[in-house]
Amino acid sequence: MLVDALAAYDASAGTPRLVVVVTGKGPLKARFLEAVEDRRFAKVVAKTAWLPAADYAALLGAADLGVCLHSSTSGLDLPMKVVDMFGAGLPVAALAFPCVGELVVDGANGALFADAASLAAALADLLADVDANPRLAARRAGVDVAERWGAMWARAVLPVVGAP
């Protein structure tokens, strides 16, 4: 779905260049990279990265928009990646499924999409003139967390998992 959305975004007139960093080291990583390479995008650069926690937080903090493709077979579990992104103050475009609206509120702190076409549309809408886009700015403001990712990690997770 992401590769198809990036292809539609890439083909759209007037969309700015886009750098996509897919984090993780799951079994679909090689297939994703191959599919991206096969498309030969003009405006999209896609990379993958597996990062230590501090670097992951820095990456999220430097991004303009997060994308979450998590879906739930039960429809009841929420994607922790969205929590990470919100902790870094990052609005999120998330795949719509029954309970994701408990985290990502379409139009308030992110955008919900159903397929590649609606993801491409959300990317084009929110990333157009990214520094002066009122729709993206409103979603950033909607990510209202009192405690940012790094502080939350240090307080809640580090005592459990310990220092690397």
Image: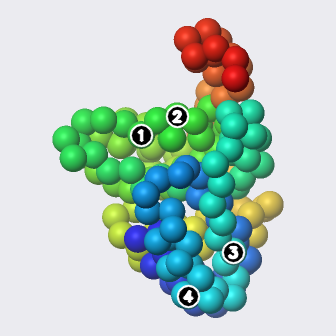
SS class, disc 4: helix
SS class, disc 1: loop
Q: Which residue is mark 2?
A: 83
- Dot 1 amino acid type: Pro
Residue 135 sits above or below residue 3 on the image: above
Which callout, 4 or 3, points at the residue further toward the start of the chain?
Answer: 4
Which callout, 2 or 3, points at the residue further toward the start of the chain?
Answer: 3
- Dot 4 amino acid type: Arg
SS class, disc 2: helix
Q: Which residue is mark 1?
A: 79
Residue 47 place in picture, x, y as percent: 66, 66
Q: What residue is drawn where x is 62% and y is 32%?
A: 87
Give me the disc on residue 39: 4
Which callout, 3 or 1, points at the residue further toward the start of the chain?
Answer: 3
Residue 137 sits above or below residue 99 on the image: below
Instruction: Give the Cα distance between marks 1 and 4.
Output: 28 Å
Q: Which residue is mark 3?
A: 45
- Are circles 4 and 3 on residues that touch, CB within 8 Å? no
Please tell me how many numbered marks the rendered image carries: 4
Residue 158 place in picture, x, y as percent: 63, 15
Which label sits in the foreground, 1 or 4? 4
Residue 137 place in picture, x, y as percent: 69, 51
Residue 74 place in picture, x, y as percent: 19, 41
- Dot 2 amino acid type: Val
Q: Residues within 10 Å of mark 2 (few under 14, many from 20)?
A: some
Q: 54 or 104: which is nearer to us?
A: 54
Give me the disc on residue 46: none
Instruction: Give the Cα distance between marks 1 and 2.
Output: 7 Å
Q: What residue is drawn where x is 25% and y is 36%?
A: 76
- Are circles 2 and 4 on residues that touch, CB within 8 Å? no
Residue 113 sits above or below residue 84 on the image: below
